[in-house]
Image (spheres, coloured by chain):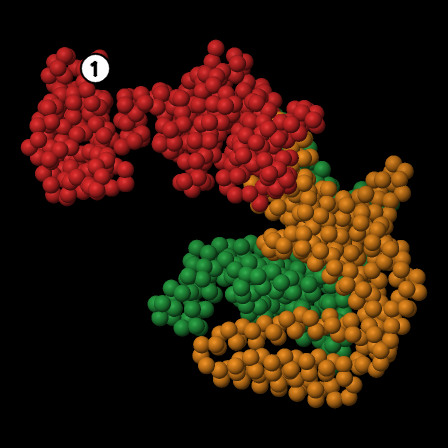
């Protein structure tokens, strides 16, 4: 095909989704970056960029950032959020591994069904899944605690750890385990020295898929936890809808984005390293 | 006027020159084959004829017209793909009808032609089947029928028999020859199997690294290879290295450890130049030691090994200079499995006209 | 044999745990007994002969995890038939809560909104997502994959918040300047949903294309079809199952979405998840259970349908 018609076709087919996403995804993101450098409006929201009425703040400022980096409490909240996310990821990993391994080792005809069974609870509404734990933990007096928040987070994110782990484990060559056994390795040895190292990329994938969303979740701490359990997501929500300090909320969102990118980068670097070593 | 003319066509992919200044003409009614090892450029050339790729330099002319601006769907050229590329969501009949629908041939004419095509490939009752219900050989035939149904000027076949097992492959080869003769359409066939090329083609272009090494009829390619690559690629070959000696009417090849070998007189012979004699195994006579074969080139040797294939046996003979020679002998004597055993002393001989003298 | 017995014992323990959620008095006793049973089953299995051990532990742990995944949802459904305002113990069977649902104006409006939004969002996202999937497979662009997949991978709150600012601080004043009144409502929710649904459809369509024999498209052109004809007669029919599965996924994601809808909807626009959220925070009654059960049934049906149409897509989605 002549190169010129290739290019027009590329724009014809890829153009509309591209344009849509530029306008409704990229643009809002850029606007939010700018917003983090503005003053909050008189009645909430954002103050105008150009001076409108005398006595009203306008223009750009780094006020939100100075507040953030100045007060220790924000660092503590971020640390707490990371802690919750890390604990959730760990628990998910421990719970997901046996299931993923079981499905990967089951005969082919059972696997699709078993995977479907893992995915089906995910089909129910997010809030319903959180609500269910309200019902369960309430009568046992375990509600509105850090424990409840973790349980809720794990419950909602578990499939995202199981699936990547399973995808990885399924690809393992069974001959490797046979070879290890032939050379004298027992069951635990075979797992620890063969299966586990080879599954590291899958683990890191799953970790990223769990860790990152947890940072931004506000509904679970709100519904299942106490005031003390607020994480970054809660703060962002509060900024936008509660105190209506939009610049501050935008700044927090940017901080969250930076954290997310850092985690994504770290897990993908770790996954790459583990691949090379294995 | 040739049906297809390829003029100085070059195609490069970054640092790799896939097709290097190739020129050849294909006549109407031919079974023309592009033969060569993988990476030699034959498939690239085929795709350029079909229109899926454009040459960087040079031109392709069909019936005298330059096809540079003609997209694949407008060229009267059809391709049989290596994977058959049957449309999985259409029945066999719908697959075959596809090009007729594209040419807007009308329902009645289409139905008739589809029926004829199915009959031609002996799949009359499979019209309503879906591709995944067919065997490899059947899919092959549907692909052929589909490409031939609207009688293109040229049919391109990209290693179509590659996925078939040996027996099926041989059957299909015969069917292909018959079909081509019956339909009269020019075939351009791409393969890396030299035996297949020899069996099917009217002419073969042997390609290597983007260039055409030799373009000739099969028998001439086999009997008179122009260079080492062709000699080695086609069939089995014995290579005797040496130096040209003797005179113009009585040329000789001086081979170290063996002596002087009488060779055929060729133009451009010059004493002293390094050369090699390419000798086919069936040209080497083998007889028990001491027999006088009555041929100018006669040497003593010992049987080192042999390959029994059923109809023929290839004997591997150690020559006095340490070189090994392959000699082919048909196993025609009933009740005798082979003539010579390992370790037998034999005489190998061949006439002066046998083989081809190749430059270094 | 002992392994099977141990697993059976574990199942029994899980059942007792389940019952403890429904019981009135003696909750803690039942729960304690259940945990003891489960632990005992573990011990029993551990005493098994060496050969079976690894497999036993896999089954033992997996059973617990599967139970963990399903029991909460089963409880929600069961309590939707509970004849009591509290979700603490089982009193009696009733379908009254479902009846109350259908009389609840706000709930019905929210349900209607959810369906409308989901239909619109799914339709638009399917068209744009299919185009994106084809473009990414065919032309390997560099920026498009980033734009398509990031909304799916990043925390939802970021997308929701940035769209809120965009709608109210950019779109609204800009459109207001030309005389168009613009505010948060159904349209903004649809736009927000499309933004992250495109990714789902694109992944599925691209995976479908990647699994096909490329030469089929060349064959069509070779036999005389123009690029448009090739698309219409060959490409489209072949990717159709993927497109439909993608549409179903988009519909499901839209109906279920909470966070993004939370920020992109205005005061007057309620969807089912938002309605459920309000009910959870304000007054928890088994009506919530009832609507949850209905919603679960719907999305369950849709996912099963999607997985039947394209069984390998679950795996593609996981990647």
Colour green maps to chain: A
User: What chain is tagged by disc 1?
Assistant: B
Colour orange maps to chain: C
Q: Is residue C177 left or right of residue B293?
A: right
Q: Colour of chain B?
A: red
Q: Residue at x 64, y 71 (%)?
A: C66
Q: In the rendered image, which residue does mark 1 sit on?
A: B266
Residue C97's image quarter?
Answer: bottom right
Under tag 1, what secondary structure? loop
Q: Residue at x 78, y 71 (%)?
A: C77
Q: Residue at x 46, y 65 (%)?
A: A195
| Residue C293 shows up from this direction | yes
Residue extending farthest top:
B1
Name the foreground residue: B145 vs A201: B145
Quadrant, the C terminus of chain B: top left
Residue C231 in percent (x, y) is at 66, 34
In this rendering, the answer to whether C294 lies above or below C78 is above
Residue B76's image quarter?
Answer: top right
In this rendering, the answer to whether C39 lies above or below C233 is below
Residue C53 in percent (x, y) is at 48, 77
In this rendering, the answer to whether A231 lies above or below C156 is below
Name the foreground residue: B100 vs A63: B100
Q: Is residue C122 left or right of residue B204?
A: right
Residue C91 in percent (x, y) is at 84, 82
Q: Residues within 10 Å of mark 1 (few under 14, many from 20)?
A: few
Residue A125 in percent (x, y) is at 75, 62
| Residue B211 shows up from this direction | no
Residue A213's image quarter?
Answer: bottom right
């Amino acid at each position: 095909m002549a190169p010129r018609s290739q290019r027009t076709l590329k724009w014809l087919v890829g153009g509309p989704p591209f344009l849509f996403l530029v306008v409704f995804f990229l643009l809002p993101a850029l606007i939010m970056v700018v917003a983090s450098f503005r003053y909050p409006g008189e009645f909430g929201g954002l103050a105008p960029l150009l001076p409108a009425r005398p006595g009203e703040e306008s223009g750009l400022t780094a006020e939100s950032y100075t507040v953030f980096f100045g007060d220790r409490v924000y660092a503590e909240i971020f640390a707490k959020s990371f802690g919750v996310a890390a604990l959730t990821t760990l628990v998910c990993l421990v719970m997901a591994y046996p299931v993923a391994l079981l499905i990967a080792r089951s005969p082919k005809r059972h696997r699709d069904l078993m995977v479907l069974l893992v995915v089906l609870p995910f089909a129910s509404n997010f809030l319903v899944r959180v609500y269910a734990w309200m019902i369960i933990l309430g009568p046992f007096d375990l509600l509105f605690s850090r424990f409840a928040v973790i349980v809720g987070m794990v419950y909602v994110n578990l499939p995202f750890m199981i699936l990547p782990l399973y995808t990885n484990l399924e690809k393992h060559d069974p001959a490797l385990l046979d070879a290890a056994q032939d050379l004298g390795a027992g069951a635990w040895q075979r797992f620890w020295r063969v299966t586990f190292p080879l599954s590291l990329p899958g683990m890191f994938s799953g970790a990223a898929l769990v860790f990152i969303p947890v940072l931004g979740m506000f509904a679970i701490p709100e519904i299942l936890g106490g005031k003390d359990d607020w994480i970054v997501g809660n703060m962002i929500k509060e900024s936008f809808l509660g105190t209506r300090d939009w610049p501050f909320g935008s700044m927090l969102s940017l901080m969250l984005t930076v954290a997310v990118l850092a985690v994504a980068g770290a897990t993908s670097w770790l996954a790459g390293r583990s691949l090379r070593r294995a | 006027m040739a049906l297809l003319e390829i003029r100085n066509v070059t195609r490069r992919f970054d640092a790799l020159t896939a097709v290097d200044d190739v020129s050849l003409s294909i006549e109407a009614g031919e079974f023309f084959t592009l033969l060569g090892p993988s990476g030699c450029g034959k498939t690239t050339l085929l795709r350029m004829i079909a229109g899926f790729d454009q040459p960087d330099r040079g031109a392709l002319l069909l019936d005298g017209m330059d096809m540079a601006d003609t997209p694949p769907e407008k060229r009267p050229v059809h391709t049989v793909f290596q994977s058959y590329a049957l449309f999985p969501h259409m029945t066999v009949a719908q697959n075959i009808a596809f090009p007729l629908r594209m040419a807007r041939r009308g329902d009645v004419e289409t139905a008739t032609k589809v029926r004829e095509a199915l009959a031609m490939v002996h799949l009359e009752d499979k019209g309503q089947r879906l591709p995944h219900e067919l065997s490899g050989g059947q899919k092959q035939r549907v692909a052929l029928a589909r490409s031939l149904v609207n009688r293109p000027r040229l049919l391109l076949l990209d290693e179509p028999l590659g996925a078939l097992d040996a027996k099926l492959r041989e059957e299909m080869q015969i069917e292909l020859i018959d079909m081509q003769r019956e339909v009269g359409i020019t075939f351009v066939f791409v393969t890396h199997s030299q035996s297949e090329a020899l069996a099917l083609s009217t002419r073969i272009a042997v390609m290597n690294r983007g260039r055409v090494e030799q373009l000739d009829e099969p028998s001439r390619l086999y009997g008179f290879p122009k260079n080492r690559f062709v000699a080695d690629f086609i069939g089995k070959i014995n290579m005797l290295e040496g130096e040209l000696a003797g005179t113009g009417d009585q040329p000789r090849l001086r081979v170290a450890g063996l002596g002087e070998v009488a060779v055929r007189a060729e133009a451009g012979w010059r004493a002293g130049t390094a050369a090699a004699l390419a000798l086919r195994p069936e040209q080497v006579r083998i007889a028990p030691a001491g027999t006088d074969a009555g041929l100018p080139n006669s040497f003593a040797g010992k049987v080192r090994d042999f390959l029994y294939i059923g109809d023929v046996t290839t004997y591997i003979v150690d020559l006095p200079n340490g070189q090994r020679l392959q000699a082919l002998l048909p196993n025609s004597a009933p009740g005798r499995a082979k003539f010579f055993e390992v370790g037998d002393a034999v005489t190998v001989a061949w006439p002066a006209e046998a083989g081809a003298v190749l430059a270094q | 044999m002992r392994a099977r017995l141990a697993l059976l014992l574990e199942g029994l323990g899980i059942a007792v745990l389940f019952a403890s959620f429904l019981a009135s008095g003696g909750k803690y006793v039942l729960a304690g007994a259940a945990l003891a049973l489960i632990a005992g089953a573990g011990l029993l299995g551990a005493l098994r002969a060496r050969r079976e051990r690894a497999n036993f532990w896999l089954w033992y742990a997996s059973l617990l995890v599967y139970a963990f995944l399903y029991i909460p949802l089963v409880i929600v459904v069961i309590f939707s038939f509970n004849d009591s305002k509290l979700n603490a113990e089982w009193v009696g069977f009733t379908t009254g809560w479902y009846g109350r649902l259908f009389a609840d104006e706000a709930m019905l409006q929210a349900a209607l909104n959810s369906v409308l939004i989901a239909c619109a969002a799914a339709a638009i996202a399917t068209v744009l997502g299919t185009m994106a999937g084809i473009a990414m497979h065919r032309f390997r662009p560099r920026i498009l994959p980033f734009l398509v997949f990031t909304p799916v991978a990043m925390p939802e709150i970021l997308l929701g918040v940035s769209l809120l600012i965009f709608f109210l601080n950019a779109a609204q004043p800009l459109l207001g300047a030309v005389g168009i009144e613009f505010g948060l409502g159904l349209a903004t929710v649809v736009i927000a949903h499309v933004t992250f649904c495109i990714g789902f459809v694109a992944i599925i369509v691209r995976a479908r294309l990647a699994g096909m024999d490329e030469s089929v498209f060349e064959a069509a052109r070779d036999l005389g079809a123009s690029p448009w004809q090739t698309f219409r007669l060959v490409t489209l029919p072949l990717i159709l199952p993927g497109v439909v599965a993608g549409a179903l996924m988009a519909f499901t994601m839209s109906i279920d979405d909470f966070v993004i809808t939370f920020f992109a909807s205005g005061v007057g626009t309620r969807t089912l998840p938002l309605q459920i959220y309000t009910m959870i925070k304000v007054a928890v009654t088994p009506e919530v259970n009832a609507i949850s059960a209905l919603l679960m049934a719907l999305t369950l049906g849709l996912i099963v349908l999607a997985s039947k149409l394209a069984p390998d897509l679950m795996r593609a989605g996981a990647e």
